[in-house]
Amino acid sequence: MTNDLARHHLETRLVHDGSFRSEFGETSEALFLTQGHVYASAEECEARFKDEVPGYIYARFSNPTVAMFEARMASMEGAEAARATATGMAAVTAALMGQVKAGDHVVAARALFGSCRYVIEEWLPRFGVETTLVDGKDLSAWKKAARPNTKVFFLESPSNPTLEIIDIAAVAKIAHEVGAKLTVDNVFATPMQQKPLELGADCVVYSATKHIDGQGRCLGGVILASNQFITDYVKTPLRQTGPALSPFNAWVLLKGLETLAVRVERQTRSAGTVADALAGHAKLSKLIYCGRADHPQAEIIKKQMAGGSTLIAFELKAGKEAAFRFLNALSLIKISNNLGDAKSLITHPSTTTHQRFTAEERAEMGVGDGLVRLSIGLEHPNDLIKDVLTALERA
Ligand SMILES: *Cc1c(COP(=O)(O)O)cnc(C)c1O
């Protein structure tokens, strides 16, 4: 069914791995748009339900197109197993809730995607799971926060939207010393630029909605880990609670994976070019890009990332009014909350993704009123630079 993983380079595996062909020998992966399957006999049906023979039963448990997507994701990440979900948030929620029960404790980095923070701060505590938020950059804070009942460490690196970096290998080591497991949300790094499992994490989650689709079409998510981890924490809860990925979306995401390497490579190169063109601009108080030597954590980036990512963050000195004038003056780059798209997209976090936080909490996360997050797409970088510089003149 799948190729010998070790034989091929990543780009090759993104095109071929996980594919299996029907009796018609189709070139492109087939879209099995079916809720369920039929059986030759009642005996066969019984055997499948008892897991005595392999085969599909019902699309809430598994589906051939979804299985191809999962196998290709696992190959790419170097994980033993992958389970797809309807959205990135379904992946985060299932991965975290599967590992804990009432009375357990979770430690998470404070700089998180807004919905991830909701799950940690509000959702888990409703079921008797205690949670502590720490400054993820401060390794001693993880150690101090750990308790005998700590089961999970959770982080995002680079973080949204300030592109803060956490030393994944160091946090994984602390997690294991205190008997916890580390889950990493790897959306911002993309699967091309960071491999948390190789750095010691126990579980990786993605919103496939972002770079994996990469063309703004559908939502999806995935949880990657060892067979043991998936069996112990993920498989049965997903099957019984039902945040399953639609086979149609799995098919779109499979096609997205085929072009992931070229897209992310090009978008990252363009992001570097745009960041360099913006560095030192008189109207900016701050420019953060993971591929630049002036990133505050450039040393850790060198250790754990292969590239700079497709995102840039920068702060306009004159605050919210200037940021809004800048966004409204852009013509090519579109105002949106999304990222990782073929189209360049810009976000004003303090009034959108991070608006539910108090000004104090935002300041703690580095989300000032003048901060913008720019996701670089597939346009020619010179057109993007022209758009940004022209709009900055008007800001
Ligand atoms: C978008 C995003 C998510 C959530 O993904 P959805 O597919 O929108 O549910 C989670 N984490 C990070 C870092 C994200 O950027």
Image: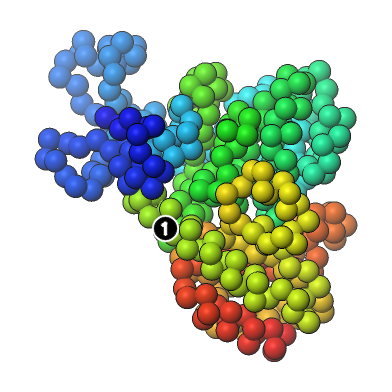
The residue indicated by pointer 1 is: 262
Of residues 122 and 245, the one nearer the viewer is 245
Judged left or right of residue 120, residue 190 is left
Q: Quadrant of the N terminus?
A: top left
* Residue 89, placed above or below residue 275: above
Judged left or right of residue 141, residue 276 is left
Place of residue 10 in the rendered image (x, y in percent of width and height, measured from the top left):
41, 43
- Amino acid type indicated by mark 1: Val
Residue pictured at 50% horizontal, 67% vertical: 377
* Residue 6, placed above or below residue 89: above
The answer to whether residue 63 of the structure is visible from this angle is: no
Q: Quadrant of the C terminus?
A: bottom right
Place of residue 148 in the rendered image (x, y in percent of width and height, measured from the top left):
81, 18
Q: Quadrant of residue 5?
A: top left
Q: Quadrant of residue 7?
A: top left
Q: Quadrant of residue 311?
A: bottom right
The answer to whether residue 220 of the structure is visible from this angle is: yes
Residue pictured at 52% horizontal, 18% vertical: 228
Place of residue 40 in the rendered image (x, y in percent of width and height, measured from the top left):
15, 19
Question: Quick one: SS at disc 1?
Answer: helix
Label 1 C-beta lies within 8 Å of the nearest ligand 1 atom: no
Of residues 9 and 39, the one nearer the viewer is 9
Of residues 303 and 353, the one nearer the viewer is 303
Count of numbered tags: 1
Circle 1 packing at 10 Å, graded few (<14), some (14-19), many (20+), is: few
Residue pictured at 47% horizontal, 63% vertical: 266
Place of residue 357 in the rendered image (x, y in percent of width and height, measured from the top left):
79, 55
